[in-house]
Amino acid sequence: MPNQDKDNLFSEIMELLTQEGLNGSGEAMRLLLNAAMRLEREHHLGAAAYERNEQRRGYANGFKPKTIQTRSGALEVSIPQVRDSSFYPSALEKGIRSERALKLALAEMYVQGVSTRKVAAITEELCGFEISSSQVSRLAKELDEALETWRQRPLGCFRYVYLDARYEKVRQDNVVMDCAILIAVGVSENGIRQVLGVSVELSEAEVHWRKFLKQLQERGLHGVLLITSDDHPGLGAARQAAFPAVPWQRCQFHLQQNASKYVPKQELKASVAADIRCIFDAPDRAEADRLLDKAIKAYEKTAPKLAVWLMESIPEGLTVFAFPKAHRRRIRTSNIVERLNQEIRRRTKVARLFPNEASCLRLVSAVLMEISEDWASDVPILSFEKHNDGKK
């Protein structure tokens, strides 16, 4: 960028901030971002606009408008383009990882010939240009390398770990299957959330969960005080094998849902749900046990199967009472992963069907990586200061 242009930009920004104060910060940010992207394009091409030299590696191709969301509000920026579509400003990279992954997932369907007209139309609309096989291959390789590095990054001490799975439709050998997406989230010693890992497997069988948990340990996961998850046979067996000494908290939200299967009459459902909530909201384990015994006796005659289920299952959701009271609401359910699943569902519902496991893993990893990085800048959700006992 010529010095005269730099001087003009500086003067314009200073005038905005002087006249508008903080109200002008958004426009100032837009000007700076546009200038930074133009400079980055010049560096990418090896030449400034209209400059002729032997080091030039390509040619500029105008600008593309894009609205981005920032803390200063929505900004309308002008993204510099190059003729071979090989450039995208690094300043916007973080926010578009999942968007790019979605484009690639849809593009793979389009290129491999397994898409419908609707998927092809969505691909063209999202990408804005025709996608060739070589372009998909190159972009996929770059993205996959970054995502694999994130999935294999070293871990450390995480006090609480949450495990859950969801399913996506994936084509396997010309057969559409429901593949399991295994997800682990942890809370570190400083109280910060982090997505620890993700894997796409054929099912939630023990062999797949055990491999997933073993990989977390190999990456350095240690110091776990509690694991929170739903009651799935494969996950339970794998958890006991990988973390035999770590207490397990059965998700109270899922327990509440499971109870309805054992309620024989519709008119009993509200009272059963209220009784279970009272147990979970008890001030301590002794009171929770007392309320549980009361509920079991109350339903022994009117709903014997429910009474047996209460006696066998509810205690698995009471492990949380051995931990600090200030932590209990955060660790008594696996809702932290459920919210991730909702975000994944929002991004994958457009694709509907993935052509292979790699395509599915790419999109899910990109979504989770973006969320996990955002969490890193959040305030801690828990404090691990020393407590006198588990009740305070």
Image (tube, grey):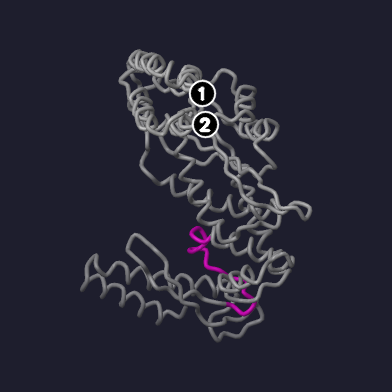
In the image, residue 146 above or below residue 227: below
Question: Is 143 located above or below residue 152 in the figure?
Answer: below
The correct choice, above or below, for 219 with respect to 358 in the image is: above
First to last magenta residue range: 82-96
In the picture as drawn, the residue positioned furthest to the right comes out as 173
Figure quadrant of residue 114: bottom right
Q: Which residue is mark 1?
A: 248
SS of the residue under disc 2: strand
Residue bearing mark 2: 229
The picture places residue 302, in percent across and down from the top left corner, at 42, 20
Please tell me which residue is depicted at 48% across the width and 59% down the height of the picture. 95
Relative side of 12 to 136, left or right: left
- The kind of secondary structure element at disc 1 is strand
Depicted 378 relative to depicted 1: above or below: above
Residue 226 location in percent, x, y?
A: 49, 25
- The amino acid sitting under disc 2 is Ser
Is 72 positioned to the left or the right of 368 in the image?
left
Instruction: Tell me whether circle 1 and circle 2 mark residues in contact (CB < 8 Å).
Output: yes
Q: Would you call the spot at circle 1 few (<14 residues within 10 Å), some (14-19), or many (20 or more)? A: many
Report how many numbered discs are placed on residues in the image: 2
**Residue 88 included in the magenta stretch of the image:** yes
> How many neighbours does mark 2 have within 10 angstroms: few (below 14), some (14-19), or many (20 or more)?
many
Q: Going from the N terminus, do you reach mark 1 or mark 2 first?
A: 2
